[in-house]
Amino acid sequence: MRSDRLAGSRRRRRAQETKALLERETVDEDRRNHLIALSDAAQALVPELAQLDDQYGDEFCGHLPVQVRTAVVDAMKNVVAVHGLKNVPIE
């Protein structure tokens, strides 16, 4: 019984933390649709997360030849461009 309450408490805390990092925006063209965007607090975390990404990218993809790594990055840049994604750290 006590462990169920602790698990529920953890889930609520995690949900509150997630809400602090995300914002919901209404799409002007169709107000039934919403976009989920990073809050200012989440944007502030981006440089730190990018550094961790570089660190783990080297750890997990370091074995790949440069040519293959370049192709993967180019493919992701294409996805960002085709879908018109903004504020995506792709460099």
Image (cartoon, helix red, strand yellow):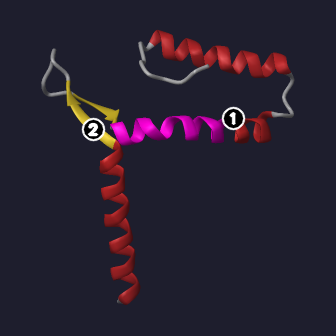
Residue hosting label 1? 54
Q: Main secondary structure of the magenta part?
A: helix
Which amino acid type corresponds to the residue marked 1 in the rendered image?
Answer: Asp
Which amino acid type corresponds to the residue marked 2 in the rendered image?
Answer: Glu
In this rendering, would 26 be left or right of 3? Answer: left
Residue hosting label 2? 23
Q: Residue at x 42, y 18 (%)?
A: 85
State which quadrant residue 59 falls in.
Answer: top right
> Is 12 drawn above or below residue 58 in the view shown?
below
Q: Residue at x 57, y 40 (%)?
A: 49
Residue 26: percent from left, percent from top: 18, 27
Residue 32: percent from left, percent from top: 14, 28
Dot 2: within a 10 Å radius of its alpha carbon, few (fewer than 14), some, or many (20 or more) residues?
some
Which one is in front, 55 or 63?
Answer: 55
Which of the image's four quarters has the N terminus?
Answer: bottom left
In this rendering, would 32 be left or right of 67? Answer: left
Judged from this view, the residue extending furthest toward the left is 31
Secondary structure under tag 2 reads strand
Residue 87: percent from left, percent from top: 44, 22
Distance from label 1 to label 2 (Cα)? 26 Å
In this rendering, would 71 be left or right of 49? Answer: right
Q: Is residue 51 magenta?
A: yes
Which tag, 1 or 2, sits closer to the chain's start?
A: 2
Residue 9: percent from left, percent from top: 33, 73
Magenta range is 40-53
